[in-house]
Amino acid sequence: MSQPDNIRDLYELYALGLLEEPELSQVEEELRSGSTEARARLRNAMENNAIILANVPVVEPGKGLRARVIGSVGAPAANRHWMWVMGTVAAGLLIGVIYLGTVNSQKETQLAEVRGQMQSVLSQSAVANAELRKARQVLSFLNSAETKVVTFGPKDPKPPRGRVLLHPNRGVVLIASNLPPAPAGKIYEMWVIRKGRNPVPAGLFQTDADGNGIHIQEGTVTADVLVAVTLEPESGSAQPTTTPLFAAGL
Amino acid sequence: MSFLLSFLFAAFESRQDGELIARLKRRDQKAMSDLYDRFGKLVYSVILRIVKEPGTTEDLTQETFMRVWNRAQFIDEEKGAIGPWILAVARNRAIDYLRSVDGRMAQKSTEFDPGMEQPASFSRVERDILNSDRARVLREAFTKLTPNQRVVIEMAYYEGLSQTEMADRMKQPLGTVKTWVRTALQVLRNELEEVVPV
């Protein structure tokens, strides 16, 4: 087998980061040469790797994972059922609006009112729904015997203060006060840190004008973790870029 | 007709990819839920296949999506393939975890190279590759591998073992393992060449 054929067979391993010497240097040399064939081979290898990786039995993740992932970037994880209900309500109202508009063009003022009411109801419902959900989650944490509570801040001269609630199957709730709203372009990011491992991002949050904030990170969590909060760019960071403002652990 | 439909479907998927990448770059939080709805189950399944622990899999799935969110500005919205990229990120997170657990990180002769998960590397990779004819052919081609060939492919993709590590694990000469790996990849590639010339 000629050397080019040998190398050609190894691009998948190269793309997986598994190629060893001396073949590694040969492939890198071929890629550095600017050969269009080598680039095409690498592209094909990456496509093949994606297909092979995707050739796994598909398993349904736990129900909380979606909310946890979406919550990591600070977005409220809309409940699909509620979205459907709200969508249906909105569609019904919209049909009503169209009907009114068709029946009587003199009802423009009423239509404007209906539209305004519809928007108001939808936005109020969304906010109330999110707040209600958050309050229920915190209550549920507080009521569970498995929840462990850690207090942080009371000894600091300029505290933020608060509590971290840890539940092995439900996740972490952070209740903070005296934490001024993050400045423009910045946001607070919570981290869950297991001993000997890198901090894992656990969601972005903001506090209100009074310095109060509640952040919920759903999921499983071991009892030996440390929970920390840092100030990060508003898009969040994969790893902390500033010193923790506070940290709490059992 | 079916060709036309698959062409239209691919064009639609490609446009969706571009729009999704553009929204991720704008830090549109709704884009994250769309990204999860599209790839969450697959990412979770790939990571679970590698680490085999549901709790850790959830942690690593979250890490994967955060990494994609934080690096989305580097992927080309015109040509970047988000599906293959997110799978590479997911695999790397899971293999990295395996290595940290069993101490392989320190022993490995070649450092684990995450270079191939750089978003820019996924420019010009076919966007709809996971739904393509090639994907179907490759899945069928797996049945043509011998048991040893299948084992080494699984060790490479789902355990992140180098050929030297495979030889140690299987107590076989390195040359034999290299032949199995090379032949397995050739079998898979030959099947694919009948669909799209490499």
Image (cartoon, rainbow, N blue to C red):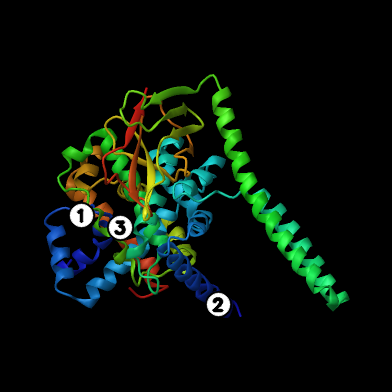
Please give the name of the residue rendered at 46% of the width and 63% of the height, measured from the top-left corner.
Answer: B130
Q: In 3D space, how far apart are the residues under numbered discs 3 and 1 (Cα atoms)?
A: 15 Å
B91 left or right of A33 in image: right
Q: Secondary structure at mark 2?
A: helix
Which residue is labeled 1 in the image? A19
Q: Is residue B50 at least partly visible in the picture?
A: no
Closer to the N terminus: mark 3 or mark 2? 2
- Using the image, name the chain to which the residue with label 2 belongs: B
Q: In 3D space, how far apart are the residues under numbered discs 3 and 2 (Cα atoms)?
A: 29 Å
Q: In 3D space, how far apart are the residues under numbered discs 1 and 2 (Cα atoms)?
A: 38 Å
Q: Is residue B16 at least partly visible in the picture?
A: yes
Q: Are marks 1 and 2 in contact (CB under 8 Å)?
A: no
Q: Position of residue A127 (x, y in %)?
A: 61, 48
Q: Position of residue A106 (x, y in %)?
A: 85, 77
Quadrant of res B25:
bottom left
Give the crowd class for mark 2: few <14, some 14-19, many >=20 residues within 10 Å: few
Which residue is labeled 2 in the image? B8
Quadrant of res B81:
bottom left
Q: Nearer the viewer, residue A199 or B85?
A: A199
Which residue is labeled 3 in the image? B117
Can you say which quadrant of the picture contains the C terminus of chain B?
A: bottom left
Please give the name of the residue rendered at 61% of the width and 80% of the height, measured from the top-left corner.
Answer: B1
Q: Position of residue B11 (x, y in %)?
A: 51, 76
